[in-house]
Amino acid sequence: MTIQNTPIGFDAYTPTWCPGCGDWAIRIGIKTAFQQLGLDPSSIFMTFDIGCSGNMNDFFNAYAMHTLHGRAIATAVGMKIANHVLTTIVIGGDGGLYGEGGNHFLHACRGNHDITVIVHDNMVYGLTKGQVAPTASKGYKSTSTPSGIVEQSVNPLALAITQGATFVAQGFAGDTPGLIEIIKAAVKHKGFSLVNVLQPCVTFNKVNTYHYYLQHTYKLEKNYDPTNFQSALGKSVEILQEKFPLGIIYQTQKKAFHEELPQLSEPLILKKRFTDIDLLLNEFI
Amino acid sequence: MTTGTVISKIATRSGYHIFSYFEYPSLIRGGNNTVEVVFSDDEITASKWKVNMLVCLNKETFDLHKHRLSKDSIVMYDPDSFEPDIECKKVPLPLKKIKEKQEIHQQMLNTVSVGASIAMLGGDVGIFEDILKHQFARKGQEVVDFNIKLARVGFDQIKADNVTPLNILSKKSETPEKLVLTGNDAFSIGTAGADCKYYAAYPMTPSSSILMSLAAWQDKTQMVVRHSEDEIAVINSALGASFAGARSSVGTSGGGFALMVEALSYAGVAEIPIVVFLGMRPGPATGMPTWTEQGDLLFATQAGHGEFPKIVLAPGDVSEMIELTLTAFDLADFYQLPVIVVSDKFLCESYKDVLKEVIEKKLKNYTPNRGKIVAKTNQSPYLRYKYEEDGVSEMLIPGQKGAFYQANSYEHIEDTHTTEESEPRKKQVEKRNKKWDTYLNKLKVKSEKLEVGGNVFFEGPKIYGDPNADTVFVSWGGTKGIVLEAQKMLASEHNKNIAFLHFTHMYPFDEELVKSHFNDHTRYILVENNSHAQFGQLLRMQTGIDIKEKLLKYDGRPFFPEEIVKYIIGEKGEPMEQKQQTAVNNLENNKNTKPNLPDQKEREEEMLKKLSARMMSA
């Protein structure tokens, strides 16, 4: 591995992903979006889950936590509460964020925590060599499901929309310019933002290839209204017909979690120490 | 406020010391709930076996406690419900009739009974009225007046019946301000006082009241208190907040702690400070949720996959809980590692009085020691995991321009990037391990950081009583008060001089320091509220000291001091523990205790007699 000598840029080690992996394009998309938003590594919190996508921890500079598998969202929630001035980004895969950490995903939507969750959705577990992921279609054959997976796929978009997420979008690793715009909008959005990125795994997923996505994705029309809850739900369930809309599917304005707490009028870490201990002791007399 | 708290506060405001213990089943309402309040002129640290006055709201209470009554005991009961069938001092209190006459809910009979109890004890009903005024102030004058009226009904009933009051709760002339605290209250106060800014928890008995107290205080303390979706989110969000620079803590019991264990390991490798409160209850699994046990000590000390340093503390009473909670936050920051504060239901939820002045002083004199956690670094490039002599690297609070780093769950090099290379792995392992050496004060590291706040090093056990006594109780954590009471009773009633060695810094140990407290010509008796003698195992593992004689109890109940006394003096007759169906056990035959003790033969005979008596009745 080589270290690129740009101390305050986003580039760190050269990625180790497979040639052609969608992660390359997603990383470029994230980096470009951040640069265009005027962010730098010292102004962002990032959490990285475990997996191929989470390995971006060494390829991307930020105040970051390379968390436990499945816990990148839960960890980011704590970071944002402690210092909400910093933009907070979660990077992870479909296995970590919809499987192992599915509970945190659901509850972070409910809380409308002001974090941007970028999910690398390739429908397989790449780092452990190709087992099925929760987003794979029913019947998908993998090393852990040789006869095909019994469960139907998770629907992250519908789940997020119905559980309180205020920004839900879908991108495609084969469309970097589109992805950059989506990520910029997601980061700018105040509240919980989901960016589900469809991403071929060139090594293990022989079904959901670049070619497959080129046939099954489409960009939302210019006049599509993402503020309409019903039509957003409608778009989110098109996956049942193997149709994948790209763009901002749903966006609404609600107070973010930290805006609901009066004690977070200023960042928690800057709060003065509580010393008026008598206020507490008197109730015990 | 519960009845027990009210009675405890009436006693402390009248100038007495108290100790109160609650027993209740895992039900929302109903079941037999009892509160045992002991008050005393002198400090008191445990419940008493003998019940001097039993207030029965129903017959079940009488049946459950009658074996602890004597002919001198006062029994307050409702003659419309039952009549005590043993010899005792009967004081009728017509609760059913009062309920009908006043048209009140069953629950309100608590207030009536407290009023009656105050009359019986010769206490000042005015103090009770003050408490009621304060408690119901927000609900309006009408509610206040109504409650005061009910208190009066009970009080006047006893007065009218011309029962001779006991005059043991009459108000003393000097009543210094005292706090009535549970272990959980003490942890909550310590946490607020330690500048903890983020507390997360998922409700679990017996630690839930910490979450509720801290949540209720948010307006005052400005802490963020969060009830997260599960214990995994609880600790991972706290690690996120801690990484971001906020002192953070979580609280739970055994089952929830089990869910947190993976994250504990993350805190270990990524060197993130975190204070974990573990209130133990009997397991395994859901176990007996509202009862007590010291069953998770080995679990706490060994929790987490992989090798990383952690520190485990176990306060013995509410004062130590405040002290060690402050210490826990300093240790977590100073060494950048997880610190586990272990308590048990007995300590979590029983009340003890402490002088307000003492606690106030302790908190006001406290200054947080954050060690090498800084808001600004002069390093360039910044090395988060830099090798240091004491094992602790500078930890930068995120935000400084031009700097960045990651808290990496993978093994890493000094600048935080992932590695699988042999040499850096070895060096990082050694760096982390050095934290323990520093904590055990083996390195004699000099640092100006040591001057701030309290002690940041290992502390050996405290010895209570005569250090030269030929018999020594050895225990840890929440059993402290019980053993102290037993020790007092043995000295005053049986002329037995027994010392007590009590541990609060549980893990890791300074082997030499701990060994220096033991010798081979003293009888040591391990007292633990569990069945595996877990502290005995830990002691043996870390020092080679093997205490053969063990007094263990694992039926979910705390020890009574009297049980420990009877174990020592081997009183004739049916052992008390069989009556109440507990499981006090001396697992080892006395033959295994240390050799060349002068009175060993006598004790052996005594023990064998006891054992055979037990076997006969079994």
Image (tube, rainbow, N blue to C red):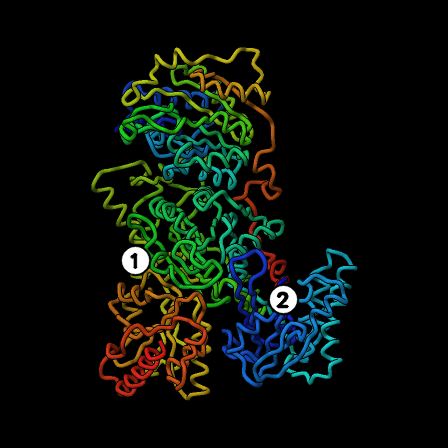
Q: Is residue A155 above or below residue B288?
A: above
Choose mark 1 or mark 2, whichever is in front. 2
Q: Is residue A191 above or below residue B233?
A: above
What's under tag 2, amino acid-wise? Thr
Q: Quadrant of residue B139?
A: bottom right
Percent of width and height locating residue B253 = 44, 55
Q: Quadrant of residue B476?
A: bottom left
Percent of width and height locating residue B128 = 70, 70
Q: Residue furthest left?
A: B422
Which numbered disc covers residue B3?
2
Q: Nearer the viewer, residue A175 or B141?
A: B141
Percent of width and height locating residue B9 = 63, 69
Q: Chain of mark 1?
A: B
The residue positioned 73% from the left and 84% from the top of the image is: B162
Query: Is A251 displayed left or right of B371 in the figure?
Result: right
Q: Nearer the viewer, residue B204 or B428?
A: B204
What's under tag 1, amino acid-wise? Asp
Element type where label 1 sits in the image: helix
Crowdedness of circle 2 by 10 Å Cα count: few (<14), some, many (20+)? some
Q: Is residue B244 above or below residue B500?
A: above
Which residue is disc 1 drawn over? B437
Q: Is residue B403 visible?
A: no
Q: Earlier in the sequence, mark 1 or mark 2?
A: 2
* Image quadrant containing the N terminus of chain B: bottom right
Q: Is residue B538 visible?
A: yes
